[in-house]
Image (cartoon, rainbow, N blue to C red):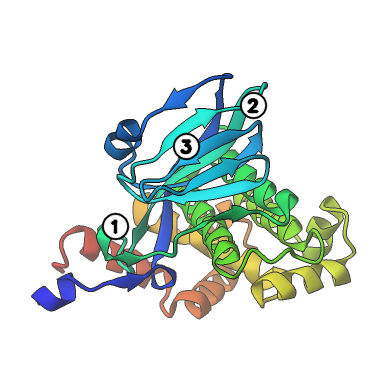
Amino acid sequence: MQARSNKRFSWHETTPMVRTISTSTSPVGFKLDATWFATRVTDFDLWLICDGRADLAMADGLRLSLARGSVVCLRPGQAVGLEVVSPAPYTNIYAHFDFVDSRGATIPPERIDLPAWHGQAANMLFFEAAMRQMIALEFLPPLPRKLMPGLRARKEIQSRILDCLLHYMATGWNAPEDRSEAVVASALSWVASNPGTTVSVPDVARRFGCSPRHFSRLFRRALGKSPSLAFQEIRIDHAKALLATCALSVTEIADSLGYGSLFYFSRHFKQATGMSPTCYRESQRNHADGGLA
């Protein structure tokens, strides 16, 4: 048992979980010393620099010049120094995140084999659009009371977007051929933000300026699946959150998520999870009770 508890994880075997995401603007001449980062940053920290320039001093002596499009991923407790050197304010988007296992437990940072990431986003449009979509999910207006558990589903969509960015960084910073990743990330975020809206692929494609055929090609290229399947997975994520955390009946949940019938909802839920909505709810209650029936 001890050997299992000390297992090391490759980052792509885990799920990144966003804790905080926002923007930050620092004035000309602003400085932070290494002690601040080492004591205050206790999780992984992903930056995208949007404006201005700054020098980043790493603990190993490496110095990075950060400008628009620079991306940096810091480890928990990593000691770095930062100084704004541009004649204009320095702005970045940052995301604090951890990695969790299949049961949702946080994995200690020292057990994550994470590449040393820093570089220049070849497609700034894609990277910035994805991070701003995560911010949009964080600060959406309050949901109706009966859909409040959908906040959990929003976090799951944030994690999917962050996972795409980490894969992008890990595969050599290759520039996408076009705006496909930005369109896909934006479409996923829009569907996740409107869980009760019945949508069709042509409707969403038109919303993002694409023909249905081209829209489907973008999804297959970026995710290896059709947009209808990707949208269905998002609705199932919302359904799982509602089943696990609220007292709505299965029929009420199906209605709130725009399913035409309980049968249709139950069939798709079982195809996605391997169990009926009722069985899934019971399994979550047993898990919350410590596994006791």
Q: Which residue is mark 1?
A: 109
Q: Quadrant of the C terminus?
A: bottom left
Q: Residue at x 87, y 72 (%)?
A: 213
Residue at (51, 72) in percent of width and height = 269
Q: Return the residue at label 2.
A: 86
10 Å neighbourhood of mark 3: few (<14), some, or many (≥20)? Answer: few
The image quadrant that residue 276 belongs to is bottom left
Q: State the image coordinates of residue 130 (x, y, percent, origin top left).
A: 64, 50
Q: CA distance from mark 1 to mark 2?
A: 33 Å
Q: Amino acid at mark 2?
A: Ser
Residue 145 got which mark? 3
- The tag earlier along the polypeptide, 1 or 3, is 1
Q: Amino acid under label 1? A: Pro
Comparing labels 2 and 3, the label whose residue is closer to the camera: 2
Say whether marks 1 and 2 touch (CB < 8 Å).
Answer: no
Q: Is residue 38 left or right of residue 44?
A: left
Q: Amino acid at mark 3?
A: Arg
Counting residues from the start of the chain, the first of labels 2 and 3 encountered is 2
Looking at the image, which is closer to me, 277 or 41?
A: 41
Q: Secondary structure at mark 2?
A: loop
Disc with the residue nearer the chain's start (1 vs 2): 2
* Residue placed most toward the observer, 49 or 208: 49
Question: Which x, y percent locates residue 59?
Answer: 36, 46
